[in-house]
Image (spheres, grey):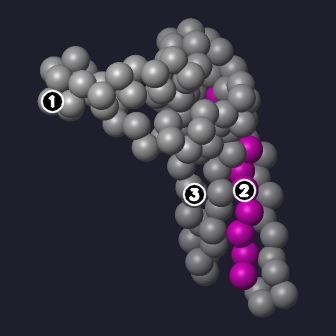
């Protein structure tokens, strides 16, 4: 499960420890739902709780990107923030680099 860890201030591949999935069907027969996943940060060991939306098409289930629910989730802006190393960061104008640094402090 790819999710942002607030302690490491990084997007990590959290180890899944459990999942609860619930699918519902509306009056038109459309099915969908959500999966709630408990994970562990591979770097610091922090417990992470996230939700993945599920859409169903025939027999196939499609999962959205996980959104962290606990610890408190980052804003949607953080999901759009590019992950980059220092060299890549230098390609951006100064005001954008400052913006990335400020956003990272909220992870
Ligand atoms: Zn961590």
Residue 44, how many percent across, how many down? Answer: 56, 9
Q: Is residue 60 left or right of residue 18?
A: left
Residue 25, how many percent across, how many down? Answer: 80, 77
- Tell whether circle 2 marks a residue whose Cβ is less than 8 angstroms from ligand 1: no
Q: Earlier in the sequence, mark 2 or mark 3?
A: 2
- Magenta-drawn stretch, dominant element (helix, strand or loop): strand
Magenta-drawn stretch contains 35:
yes
Q: Residue at x 71, y 29 (%)?
A: 72
Residue to which mark 1 is pinned:
91
Element on which disc 2 rests: strand
In contact (CB < 8 Å): disc 2 and disc 3: no
Residue to which mark 2 is pinned:
34
Q: Is residue 87 left or right of residue 37?
A: left
In contact (CB < 8 Å): disc 1 and disc 3: no
Magenta-drawn stretch contains 97:
no
Label placed on residue 63: 3
Element on which disc 1 rests: loop
Q: Is residue 9 above or below residue 57?
A: above
Single out the mark in the foreground, 1 or 2.
Answer: 1
**Crowd class of label 1 (few under 14; some 14 to 19; many from 20; radius 10 Å):** few
Task: Count how many numbered circles sit on residues in the image.
Answer: 3
Of all residues, the one furthest to the front in this rendering is 95
Q: Earlier in the sequence, mark 1 or mark 3?
A: 3
Q: Residue at x 67, y 26 (%)?
A: 48
């Amino acid at each position: 499960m790819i999710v942002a860890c607030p302690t490491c201030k990084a997007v990590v591949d959290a180890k899944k420890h459990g999942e609860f999935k619930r699918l519902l069907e509306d009056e038109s027969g459309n099915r969908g739902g959500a999966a709630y996943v408990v994970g562990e940060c591979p770097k610091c060991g922090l417990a992470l709780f996230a939700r993945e939306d599920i859409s169903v098409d025939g027999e196939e289930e499609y999962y959205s990107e996980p959104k962290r629910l606990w610890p408190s989730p980052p804003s949607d802006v953080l999901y759009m923030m590019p992950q980059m190393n220092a060299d890549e960061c230098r390609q951006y104008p100064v005001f954008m680099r400052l913006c990335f640094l400020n956003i990272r402090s909220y992870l």
